[in-house]
Amino acid sequence: MIKDTKLAVLIDGDNIPAKYVKEMMEEITKYGTPTIKRIYGDWTKPYLAKWKNLLLENAINPIQQYSYTTGKNATDSAMIIDAMDILYSEKVNGFCLVSSDSDFTKLAMRLREAGVVVYGIGEKKTPDPFIVACDKFIYLEILKKDPEKNDGIEKSEKPDIDKITPKIIRLLRNSVDDAADEDGWAFLGDVGSMILKKQPNFDSRNFGFAKLTPLFKSLKQFEIDQRDHNSRKFKLIYVRNK
């Protein structure tokens, strides 16, 4: 991630629920500064009413797109055209495409070909082609805070999280090997980057872990080594396959 990344946030209002907007915008700021924020949809339709107050609160610019023909998604076309206009304006060096629609697969690929970073955000129903076309893909479901959870009071039931399958273990082990030095140790930051190159929708939060370090610590297949940094203000985490 480039810390001074200027992002264009383009939201497909037709298939993204309004309930995610606060957490979604907070998540986006981790990857850059959202300098352009637009949401596309036919604002004459009642199903978009829930978005209207949220747009002012989050400074998101609504773009009106009438549905000219039944069965044709005019919103997708408007969003794609705007994305290309923004790309050529060179006002941003990254895009955040918020949609669960595979129609944006080609757009994500084209933007990456132009040398800009592409983050995707959508629900878990998002088709794989769009997910793998992005540099990183974040599921909305892991961002939504539980409104029934009070401060200091944990719910007794476990959250709905993905299981760490043998396939995931292989992904982690292979990524450690790919990033390792001659002694088999790999800097965890490099391992995380390697994992995302192979599987853009990988996120430790999908498995109930806030960060990658506790996920690796929970698995018996890996060794963890914490090393002092030159500044001594924090530890560098290294991992090795057992």
Image (tube, rainbow, N blue to C red):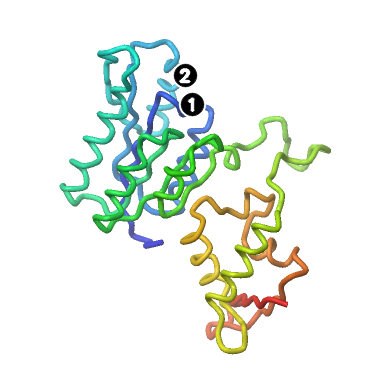
Q: Is residue 16 left or right of residue 221?
A: left
Marker disc for residue 192: none
Name the residue at 31% across, 54% down. 112
Q: Quadrant of the C terminus?
A: bottom right
Return the residue nearer the eye: 123 or 30.
123
120 w.r.t. 225: above or below:
above
Residue 137, percent from left and from top: 48, 48
Residue 212, percent from left and from top: 62, 62
Residue 207, percent from left and from top: 67, 50
Q: Are marks 2 and 1 in contact (CB under 8 Å)?
A: yes
Q: Of helix, strand and loop, which one carries label 1?
A: helix
Q: Residue furthest left?
A: 89
Name the residue at 18% across, 51% down. 90
Label located before the other in sequence (2 or 1): 1
| Quarter of the figure with residue 3 | bottom left
Return the residue nearer the eye: 131 or 158.
131
Count of numbered circles in the view:
2
Return the residue nearer the eye: 231 or 126.
126
Where is mark 2, residue-wise? 50
Q: Quadrant of the N terminus?
A: bottom left
Label 2 to label 1: alpha-carbon separation:
6 Å
Name the residue at 70% across, 54% down. 165
Where is mark 1, residue-wise? 18
Q: Amino acid at mark 2?
A: Lys
